[in-house]
């Protein structure tokens, strides 16, 4: 499902990073994010661990074990660094946030299906998850004031018709990236990237030039036989993330279910939505940092190998 020829037409691999493992640290299905200019944060949901690495793959620290007590996890989904240097980790199974630092603090998740957290500063966090149903019109992003323990605002709506909403509600994933004073966000069934202020005001909407046409959303108004469920889901293109490349590039990752795995497309565009590159069947994109694209190595025998690539010069 990975087309390395198509990948190599657009990207060149500049180095390979191998995440260090130990007897107690095994890479299974890593979720990798940047941690400042010289670090990586790796979440292993199946291992109930959060790991800190240097950019060359050297293991620095390990947090967590399986359980429900302080510093324990059942299904950690992501990890982010807060402005005061702690790590904040949402656990979708336990329905809570854990703050790892000199003292471990636990808060109940203010919204359901909490997937990610970004620190906005001044005691406010941007939460990604389902909340504020508003007459069955959910919002996926929420500004939580930790001092008052109140959701100040919810935004990023489910952009489908009332007819499609029952089916669309099964696709609850959303993604957000913070860049200076703005939030870039997508919902999994959206064909649009949304730009918001840090207060949640909508600034602009940019259509995504999808690599392949999106099929009509299937209807679940009747019982779907198990034998056809895979075909129904395979027809749904899901936008799994939006990230920033360089000074003004937007990167959208689109997934297509293929049984228990995904086939990935990548769209790179400018801020006007003009496509700069559209690649079908790429390795799984982990994150983008400046002009570097960090991909899971599809040819690695172990899942701890990462390909760091740059776009080829097209001038």
Image: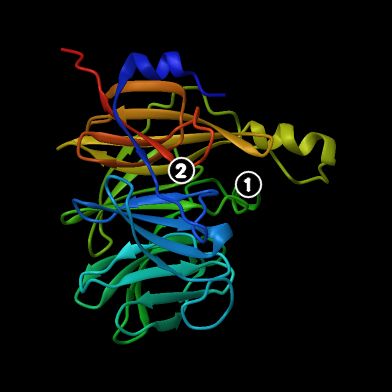
Q: Which residue is drawn at 33% across and 85% down?
A: 103
Residue 163 tag number: 1
Please tell me which residue lies in front, 130 or 95. Answer: 95
- Label pair 1/2, CB-CB below 8 angstroms: no
Q: Where is residue 100 in the image (x, y as percent from the top left)?
A: 36, 75
Mark 1 Cα shell of 10 Å, populated few (<14), some (14-19), many (≥20)? few
Q: How far apart are marks 1 and 2 (CA)?
A: 43 Å
Instruction: Write down the residue under mark 2.
Output: 304
Residue 231, by quadrant, is top right
Residue 290 tag number: none
Q: Position of residue 92 (x, y in %)?
A: 54, 66
Which image quarter holds the C terminus?
A: top left
Please tell me which residue lies in front, 87 or 160. Answer: 87
Residue 294, by quadrant, is top left
Which image quarter holds the N terminus?
A: top right
Does any portion of residue 169 appear in the rendered image?
yes
């Amino acid at each position: 499902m990975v087309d390395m020829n198509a990948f190599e037409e657009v990207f060149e691999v500049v180095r390979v990073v191998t995440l260090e493992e130990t007897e107690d640290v095994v890479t299974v299905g890593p979720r990798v994010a940047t941690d400042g200019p010289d670090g990586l944060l790796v979440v292993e949901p199946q291992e109930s661990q959060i790991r800190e690495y240097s950019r060359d793959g050297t293991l620095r620290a390990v947090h967590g074990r399986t359980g429900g007590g302080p510093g324990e996890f059942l299904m950690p989904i992501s990890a982010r660094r807060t402005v005061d240097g702690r790590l904040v980790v949402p656990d979708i199974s336990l329905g809570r946030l854990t703050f790892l630092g000199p003292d471990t603090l636990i808060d109940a998740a203010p919204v359901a299906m909490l997937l990610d957290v970004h620190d906005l500063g001044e005691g406010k966090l941007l939460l990604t998850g389902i909340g504020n149903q508003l007459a069955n019109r959910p919002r996926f992003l929420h500004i939580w004031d930790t001092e008052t323990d109140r959701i100040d605002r919810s935004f990023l709506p489910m952009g489908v018709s009332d007819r499609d909403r029952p089916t669309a509600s099964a696709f609850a994933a959303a993604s957000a990236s913070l860049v200076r004073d703005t939030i870039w966000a997508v919902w999994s069934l959206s064909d649009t990237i949304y730009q918001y202020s840090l207060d949640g005001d909508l600034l602009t909407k940019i259509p995504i030039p999808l690599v392949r046409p999106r099929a009509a959303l299937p209807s679940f108004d009747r019982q779907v036989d198990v034998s056809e469920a895979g075909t129904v889901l395979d027809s749904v293109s899901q936008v799994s993330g939006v990230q920033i490349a360089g000074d003004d590039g937007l990167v959208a990752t689109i997934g297509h279910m293929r049984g228990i795995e995904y086939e990935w497309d990548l769209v790179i565009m400018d801020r006007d939505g003009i496509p700069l590159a559209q690649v079908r069947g790429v390795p799984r994109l982990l994150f983008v940092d400046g002009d570097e694209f960090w991909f899971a190595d599809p040819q690695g025998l172990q899942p701890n190998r990462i390909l760091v690539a740059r776009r080829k010069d097209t001038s």
